[in-house]
Image (spheres, helix red, strand yellow):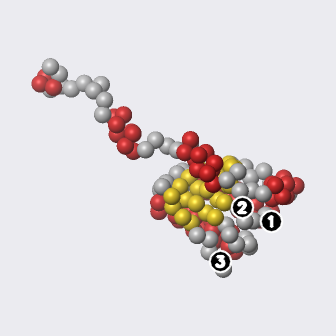
Amino acid sequence: MDRIPVLKIGDILLVSIQVDMDDHTALGLQDDLTERIVETHAHGVIIDITALDIVDSFIGRMLSTIASVSRVLDAETVVVGMRPAVAITLVELGLSLTGVRTALNVERGMELLARTAPPRASSIADADDTDDTETDDPALTR
């Protein structure tokens, strides 16, 4: 069984599918990807399907399932590089890929995830360092 590499770029996981996807490869990808989301605390997943000429109903459902599982694990999924023939096939099969966001390429997918990214811990800490708090210590309130 071919394994599809999952690369970490910042807090995003990038999956570039460069092999023909059979059912076993798709299931392996789902398992590997969910493990990596948990390990890395990724907030986003980009699945690049540029190299796929054909997507059957099982692969389409797997993309939707991966996006749903990722969302439960607090990561958004963007599928990029969908060819027009693949999009037409998915529509003809009645697969709407509910919950799957799409972008034309990896760069646009990264931009989309950047807009939906949660605030970083440092910006949350900076917001908490305001002088709005009251204190009972008179020495601190002068």
Q: Residue 32 at x, y = what percent?
A: 57, 68
Q: Which residue is mark 2?
A: 50
In the image, is residue 16 above or below residue 11? below
- The mark lying in front, picked from 1 and 2, is 2
Q: Earlier in the sequence, mark 3 or mark 1?
A: 3
Q: Position of residue 18 (x, y in %)?
A: 68, 69
Left or right: 14 in relation to 79: left
The residue that disc 3 covers is 2
Quadrant of the image occupied by residue 34: bottom right
Q: Please, what secondary structure does the residue beneath circle 1 have?
A: loop
Going by the numbered disc 1, the residue's amino acid type is Ile
Q: Quadrant of the C terminus?
A: top left
- Front label number (3 vs 2): 2
Amino acid under label 3? Asp
Q: Residue at x 51, y 58 (%)?
A: 9
The residue that disc 1 covers is: 54
Q: Quadrant of residue 116?
A: top right
